[in-house]
Structures are given as C-alpha cells and as structure tokens.
Image (cartoon, rainbow, N blue to C red):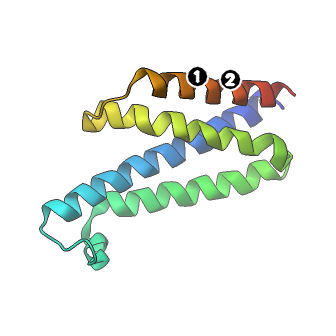
C-alpha cells in the first residue's frame, strides 16, 4: 500500500470515529430534551446528528474510492482502528473511564492493523 492509501484508510477510520462521537452528542441532547427514547423524530432537530450522517457519507465515498485500488482484505482491518479511536474520544469528550484491559486490547488492535498493513 502507498502512503496515500494508508492515509486515506486512517482518514476513513477517523471519520467513522468522529461520526460515532457526534451520534453520542445527539443521543445526549435527545435525552436531555426530555424526548422519549423511542421518539427518534427528535433527531431531525439536532445538528450533531446531521453532521454525523455527513461524516458517515464522506467516509463511505472515501471507502469506495480506496477500494478501487486496495484489496478489501487489506483495507478492512483499518476499520478496527475506530474501536480504538471512539473510546479515546469518549474519555476526552464525555469523561468516560478506560482501564488497563482496554489499553491492552487497543494495543492488540493497533498491532494487528500494522501487521496486516505490512502483509
């Protein structure tokens, strides 16, 4: 893989992680507005929900672009990096706590992505 392809794959993971974080903001806002959790129509009024959808859309377009030149079996492991990024964003933005077990698991994910990228 070229450096540009790796950068694009990292970008896709970052877009997905940012989208997940924005979905959390939307969920918190929906709950804070007193909306029933089953009333998802309230999401239409929440800007972070729409921004998350835009990021997911951009990520999808970038994904299709990268799959033109990178085999799926080599590209897909990069999606696992979102499993590392999202909890880190949760710590920074939502004051969630992570433990040593998470750190070990995240390290294994990153190592796996590095190994598959070099294969």
**Dot 2: what SS?**
helix
- Return the residue nearer the eye: 68 or 37: 37
Label 2 Cα crowd, 10 Å radius (few <14 / some 14-19 / many 20+) = few
Q: Rounded to the nearest whole Å, what is the CA distance between mark 2 and mark 1?
A: 6 Å
**Dot 1: what SS?**
helix
Q: Is residue 35 left or right of residue 76?
A: left
Residue topped by disc 1:
107
Most distant residue in the front direction:
101
State which quarter of the image contains the N terminus: top right
Q: Residue 86 location in percent, x, y?
A: 45, 39
Residue topped by disc 2:
111
Q: Is residue 33 left or right of residue 114?
A: left
Using the image, tell me which numbered label, if any, was put on residue 94: none
Q: Is residue 52 left or right of residue 79?
A: left
Q: Residue 48 location in percent, x, y?
A: 32, 57
- Residue depicted at 33% across the width and 52% down the height: 24
- Residue depicted at 84% across the width and 52% down the height: 68
Label 1 Cα crowd, 10 Å radius (few <14 / some 14-19 / many 20+) = few
Are the residues tagged 2 and 1 within 8 Å (C-beta)?
yes
- Residue depicted at 23% across the width and 55% down the height: 28
């Amino acid at each position: 893989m070229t450096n540009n392809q790796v950068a694009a794959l990292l970008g896709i993971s970052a877009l997905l992680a940012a989208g997940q974080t924005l979905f959390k903001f939307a969920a918190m806002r929906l709950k804070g507005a007193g909306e029933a959790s089953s009333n998802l129509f309230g999401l239409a009024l929440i800007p972070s929900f729409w921004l998350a959808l835009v990021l997911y859309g951009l990520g999808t377009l970038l994904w299709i672009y990268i799959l033109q030149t990178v085999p799926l079996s080599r590209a897909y492991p990069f999606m696992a990096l979102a499993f590392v990024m999202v909890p880190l964003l949760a710590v920074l933005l939502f004051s969630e706590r992570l433990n040593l077990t998470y750190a070990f698991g995240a390290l294994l994910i990153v190592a796996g992505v590095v190994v598959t990228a070099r294969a």
